[in-house]
Image (spheres, grey):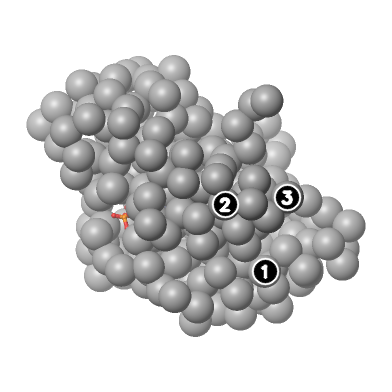
Amino acid sequence: MQSRIQIAPSVLSADFAKLGEDLADIASADCVHYDVMDGHFVPNISFGLDILKATKRATDLPVDVHLMITNPDEMIPAFIDAGADNVTFHMEATAHANRLVQLIHAAGRKASVAINPATPVSALEEVVEDVDMVLVMTVNPGFGGQSFIESSPAKIRRLRALCESRGVHPLIEVDGGIKASTAPLVAEAGADVLVAGSAVFGRDDRAQAIAEIREAAEAATLKKA
Ligand code: DX5
Ligand code: ZN
């Protein structure tokens, strides 16, 4: 049976001096998670369009661009041109989520919406029917290596209930503090895509780290079934 859980290593925790080698190390993952930070929406600056183009040249995996920026409306076309396979924008950063989803879909890419820990699931009521994926932040965005917020599984369950009430099934992604010990908590609650930065790139054997997170998550979903 094909694995239900997808693992998305975050290159924010990679060694940028040898990004190509680090991307080769994660070939067993399902996609690359690419964190864009602008120093306004979050108190940190990461990387942008040129490094995304380099990332696309160095991997065959799809790249999910997580935009932690205040002006997604202005920047999304440029990230699409640079090769984003999936564009994730924050609900808190736009008044026009529906328009952004249409714009991303018109370019033939997947569209996802993210919510911060303090943003309620109810903020997604009018978008869950339109998006391919919803990202529930399980830390306050801005930095790798933070601790998982323990109330997150309950929030994932509320999101699942909302999706079920609307009869839709966008993928549910979680991001922040995911490792082999927290993966079962989110998988059991209904997460499909697990982002992991420090838990993958902080290890010498990245393939082994990916396998451990995947196995821990899948064991929890089997227990549930
Ligand atoms: C946090 C980023 C995450 C981050 C996760 O603002 O959106 O993708 O890289 O890092 P870990 O897995 O180390 O918490
Ligand atoms: Zn992220």
Which residue type carries mark 3? Ala
Q: Percent from the top left, x then y, of residue 60?
A: 44, 18
Could you tell me how far apart the alpha carbons at marks 2 and 3 are, in whole angstroms? 9 Å
Give me the residue at 47% from left, 39% from top.
Answer: 215
Front one among 30 and 127: 30
Between residues 195 and 120, which one lies in front from this camera angle? 195
Check residue 125 in the rendering and tell me which mark sits there, or answer none: none
Residue 123 in the image, given as x and y percentages of width and height: 67, 76
Query: As shown in the figure, which amino acid type bears the numbered disc 2?
Result: Ala
| Residue displayed at 63% across by 37% down | 4
Tell which of 49 and 195 is nearer to you. 195
Give the CA separation, mark 2 to mark 1. Answer: 15 Å
Camera-nearest residue between 143 and 201: 201
Q: Which residue is mark 3?
A: 225
Q: Which element type, helix, strand or loop, lies under badge 2?
A: helix
Q: Which residue is mark 2?
A: 220
Q: Which residue is mark 1?
A: 157
